[in-house]
Image (spheres, helix red, strand yellow):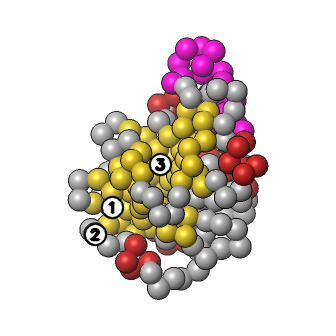
Amino acid sequence: MKITTIGIWGGYPNKNEATSSFLIEQDGFRCLVDCGSGVLAAVQNYTELKDLNAVVISHYHPDHVADIGVLQHAAMVGMQLKEWRTPFPIYAHDRDKAMFDSLSYKGVTEGVALQADQPIEIGPWQVSFCETIHPVYCLALKFTAGGKSVVFTADTEWKRNWWRFRKAPISWCPKRTCMKNMSASSKDT
């Protein structure tokens, strides 16, 4: 499992940077975790957009979804050039119906609903979820494959059940810690 920090900023990015986002890769599968402002430009330093296989969104604040429209446009152009697999899956919770519905766009992207109590298979990973403490509904994400896991906490306060959620050999990736320790770097776990 390879994890690349794409952006480290909350709220809005610094110049030439991106809001909090990670690229997670395994067995040739590439999944982008969150897609806020500046993320689509920054991720192209590590992979072509057409080589992404999925996006997972933790919640619908702009610093986590601002580039979704840009991604949808890239998918539409890629489809016209016959370089893009469609529909491209964007995984997110469906508690905000309008935001979730906007993830499906003209047959080139498709919103896939996530439920906190229902793990799902995304590429090579079993992905499970834990509701966070945040002003809007937000899910922490745990990607597990080959007996190893990585947890992305998204935006949250401390919560007692984090330790139950993160069980198993993992890389623990709380948003602020990753921002400090993994800025613009890659890590194989």
Q: Amino acid at mark 1?
A: Ser
- Which disc is residue 88 wearing? none
Residue ID for mark 1: 149
The answer to whether marks 1 and 2 mark residues whose Cβ atoms lie closer than 8 Å is: yes
Q: Which residue is nearer to you in this view: 81 or 114?
A: 114
- The mark that comes first in sequence, 2 or 3, is 3
Residue at the (47%, 36%) spot, across then down: 53
Task: State which mark lies toward you, 1 or 3.
Answer: 1
For residue 151, side relative to residue 38 (left or right): left
Q: Amino acid at mark 2?
A: Ala
**Magenta run includes residue 60:** no
Q: CA distance from mark 1 to mark 2?
A: 7 Å
Mark 2, Cα crowd under 10 Å, few <14 / some 14-19 / many 20+, is few
- The mark that comes first in sequence, 1 or 3, is 3
Residue ID for mark 2: 168
- The mark that comes first in sequence, 1 or 2, is 1
Q: CA distance from mark 2 to mark 3?
A: 21 Å
- Image location (x, y in percent) of residue 11: 72, 63
Mark 1, Cα crowd under 10 Å, few <14 / some 14-19 / many 20+, is many
Span shown in magenta: 69-85
Residue ID for mark 3: 23
66 versus 41 height, above or below: below
